[in-house]
Every structure is written in structure tokens, then in C-alpha cells.
Image (cartoon, rainbow, N blue to C red):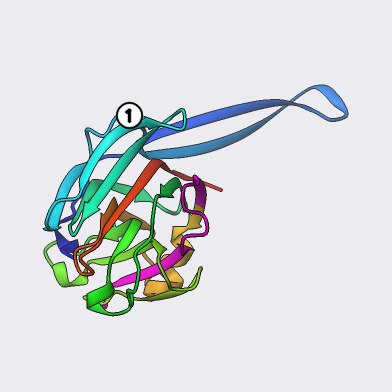
Amino acid sequence: MKLHNLLFIKPAYTRVIILCGWLFNPTAICFAETTTVKALTLPDISQWKTETFSGKTTYEVVNIDQRNAIKAVSRQSASGLVRKMPIDLAKTPYMNWSWKVENVLTNVDEQQKSGDDYAARVYVVISGGLLFWRTRAISYVWASHQAQYSHWPNAFTGNAIMVSVQSGPGASGQWVTEKRNVLEDIKQLLGVDNTEIDAVAIMSDADNSQQSATAYYGDIYFTAQ
């Protein structure tokens, strides 16, 4: 995976102020401020660019289940969509997203190069800049066989860690909502203290296993909690 190709652009921040009456004093006002960083707000994908590795997975915005989504169809291909943007994880460490797969892949060993394919993945990237060999990534995947919540090094590079957020066909055909503390994952899984990431990406790939997969991705955003 050409992780060093990922640069960044300025993110969009949304702040919400909540006013509330104090329980025993109706005249009192309390303030709660939340910050949301929007990486993917459908149907707008203008800031997302194609990154091709082996063949081209098709991505299109569709309306399905009364919601907007990106439909990804991989036919023995591996390409992704990338949003290059800095995100301050000290302020918004939680990545939130939703996804759905129509199928998972069969007879693959995801820890080997021949089986390094996933019906759906969402990943975050720490750019190494000119020192591209320092680029790091965490790839949150809908695994075919690896146990849910397990993690392992990417089969092609030790600079990327795979995390099985969902696994197997049990939830196929259903929308699943996810939340991960990326700041903690970076510390625990990559062993670094970075508080900023430089890009977010999605990818459905089936090139190594020579299979096909279809998945749907919803909005992706970062929150303080």
C-alpha cells in the first residue's frame, strides 16, 4: 500500500453549544461544547480522491435504505478513496462511521499476502512526509475470518496494523455503526505518541484473492467523545 502518497488539506470543524437549565435552579445556564470534524459527509465526496493499487474498485454515491452511501464494488481490484486532511486527535480522538457489506471473502488467510483482501476497510494515516518510510496507518477492517477485535501487521508492510472491527458474514446486509478511539489505538497498536493524523481512506479490495466484494460506506466524522 502506497501510504506515503497521502498528504493533507484543512478539515471542517462544527461546534455545537448546548444550553440547559440547572436541576434546582431554573435561572441557571450550563454550557457544553462539542466539536465534530467531518471527514465524509454524503452525498459530497468532492474532497475524496482515488488511489489505485491493482485494478480499479468502483465507487459511486447511491441512495439505499433511505440514506446516502458510497457503494464500492471490487472485482479482483484494489483501489481506494482518500481524504487528505489533518485531524487533531487531542481534540477529537473518536472516529465514527457506518458500513454494510453484501458479502465477505472465502478461503482467505488475511495475514498472508495472498489473502490481504477485505470487503470493507476504513483507515487512518500518519504521513511520514519526505521520509515516506515513516508513514504509519491503522486499517479498521470488516474481516472475513480473523476474530473480531483482533489485530495483526499488514501482510505487505510492518508500518500498517489491521484491526478486525467486524468479522464474518453474520451481519452481512445490515448497517453497522462503529466508534474507535484512534488516539488510543495509535499509542497501543503503533507504539507512537502522535496526536494528529493526516488522512482518512476507505477501500474495498479483492485483488489478491481474485474474488469480488460489495460494500457500502456512510458518513465518517471525528468527535471528542
Q: Is residue 200 visible?
A: no
Reply yes or no: does residue 174 show up in magenta. Answer: yes
Left or right of 56 in this view: 216: right
Seen at 35% across and 48% down, the residue is 215
Name the one closer to the observer, 11 or 100: 100
Q: Position of residue 123 (x, y in %)?
A: 33, 57
Left or right of 166 in this view: 5: left
Which quarter shows the N terminus? bottom left
Q: Is residue 188 above or below residue 85?
A: below
Q: Tell me where the magenta segment starts and ends, as one range.
A: 158-178
Left or right of 183 in this view: 41: left
The residue labelled by disc 1 is 43
Q: Is residue 48 visible?
A: yes
Q: How many marks?
A: 1
Q: Position of residue 78 (x, y in %)?
A: 19, 58
Q: Quadrant of residue 23?
A: top right
The amino acid at mark 1 is: Pro
Reply yes or no: does residue 18 show up in magenta. Answer: no
* Label 1 Cα neighbours within 10 Å, binned few <14 / some 14-19 / many ≥20: some
Name the one closer to the observer, 108 or 118: 108
Instruction: Give the residue furthest to the top.
Output: 27
Seen at 32% across and 62% down, the residue is 118
Seen at 47% across and 60% down, the residue is 169
Q: Is residue 82 above or below residue 46?
A: below
Name the one closer to the observer, 89 or 117: 117
Q: Is residue 145 above or below residue 19?
A: below
Q: Position of residue 2 (x, y in %)?
A: 15, 63
Q: Quadrant of residue 18?
A: top right
Seen at 28% across and 55% down, the residue is 204
Q: Position of residue 3 (x, y in %)?
A: 19, 62
Element under disc 1: loop
